[in-house]
Image (cartoon, rainbow, N blue to C red):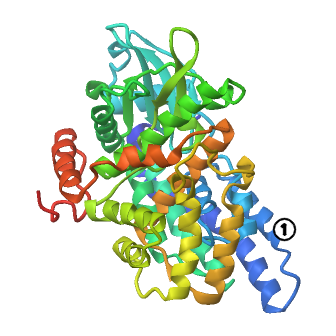
Amino acid sequence: MSDTSEGDSEKNRFSARAKRYGRVGANVGGVAARIAGRRLFGLDPEKDKDAAALAAALGGLKGPIMKVAQLLATIPEALPAEYAAELGQLQSQAPPMGWAFVRRRMAAELGPDWEPKFANFEHAAAASASLGQVHRAVAHDGRALAVKLQYPDMQSAVEADLAQLGMLFSIHRRMRPAIETSEMLKEISARLREELDYALEAKHTRLYGLIFADDSMIRVPDVLPELSTKRLLTMTWLDGRPLLDYTDRPLEERNQIARAMFRAWWFPFSQYGVIHGDPHLGNYTVFEDEGGKAAGINLLDYGCMRTFAPKFIQGVIDLYHGLLNNDRALIVHAYETWGFDGLSNELIDILNIWAKFIYGPMLEDRVRTIAEYVKPGAYGRQEAFKVHQGLREKGPVTVPREFVFMDRAAIGLGGVFLHLNAELNFYRLFNEAIAGADLADVTRRQHETFVKTGVPLPEGAAKQGL
């Protein structure tokens, strides 16, 4: 590995970005050219082959664009079905940094005397992902720590990947899309750039710690600000086991995990206007009680968060009540609150297919699984196909920015509940979560907790009034 200093590495950011830009562009552009050529001359599209080629072109990069690809794979008609299926299988893991490089990176963040600030610091990474890696350490007071260190040049990598995301969408536009993706691009870009800011992640972590301070089912790590920077985040280590270790446990335990997951996502959204936008299996573990039974979840990662103005939260609740009571006017009002414009009756009916799928388990006051007779890998596919067909005929429709991560969270949670084969009364869980979530109370809570933890208020929040 090069001995180039961290300062020189930052000076070479433009070169790194240009190099990555060329790699992504060549890979994606080559696939795009083959697809366009075949379609131009009326040849067999070979869709599945095209999808596999695109996945291979992107997969070799093992970087931030993987997070984008996986996100797009969860949104109906954001990409053609055969592309979404391939991209959804990609892994966002990156090769870990070696110890020599980790030592230099830590010195760049905490100074040359950084090692004595820890009682112990493990050389090998405990986990690695698309933007950074985690090392186990021990504080001088004996607390076990998780030290999250960002890879070098990630800002360059993210900007290059986002620039090339337009290439991915351009492929889609040649296929007569049913969804206009401009707002999605803005949203994905904003959230991915935020993930680079570990200081913001620390604030979100403190916010969730405040929200769940008295909750026995959900644990949030404590942040050590004296050992954290914009590219280094040190937190307490929360012991737990992967959720998939519990899929064969008794129903009581699986239901306990599912209840904790449901509350961890829906309660902060409805009461505080914040949602964890990345509910994949690596972002939480399960902790047990003294008897060895599953007791709750550890929420581990707060990089991909989304905050919402109280008005949008009210729209989500209005849509639920509109579907529950078959109130067409309230349903339309909810879509308009979300930011859908100029919707025809036909488009509203099509959107309702997806809405009824997302809200479906919460519309029935009974114990049930999240999606009866559906396997984990097929969650939402049938409904997505219906939406795809309908929007092709009656669209296109522009997806509001806020919808992107709401949809991702709902699909991610549904997949977890399917893995657990949980049987719960989702109607009652949801109504418990949204109780008291009116505009004035949500606004008050945002002003109290966001300001206290340093999380920026969402656009429009301050205008709601107290």
Q: State whether residue 75 appears in this view.
A: yes
On screen, residue 180 above or below 133:
below
Residue at 37% over, 32% down: 233
Q: Residue furthest left?
A: 466
Q: Nearer the viewer, residue 175 or 93?
A: 175
Amino acid at dot 1? Lys
- Where the N terminus falls, by quadrant? top right
Q: In the displayed image of the protein, which residue is found farthest to the right? A: 44
- Residue found 56% across the figure and 53% down from its top: 361
Residue 193: percent from left, percent from top? 41, 55
Label 1, on which residue? Answer: 49
Q: Position of residue 431 (x, y in %)?
A: 40, 48
Q: Quadrant of residue 150?
A: top left
* x 58%, y 32%: residue: 255
Taking 208 as reference, is 444 left or right? left
At x 52%, y 46%, the residue is: 426
Residue in the foreground of this view, choosing between 450 and 99: 450
Whether residue 19 sits left or right of residue 55 in the image: it is left
Residue 459: image x %, image y %?
A: 25, 63
Which sits in the foreground, 32 or 360? 360
Q: Nearer the viewer, residue 277 or 182?
A: 277
Image coordinates for residue 76, horizontal then vertical, percent: 62, 68
SS type, badge 1: helix
| 42 vs 300: above or below | below
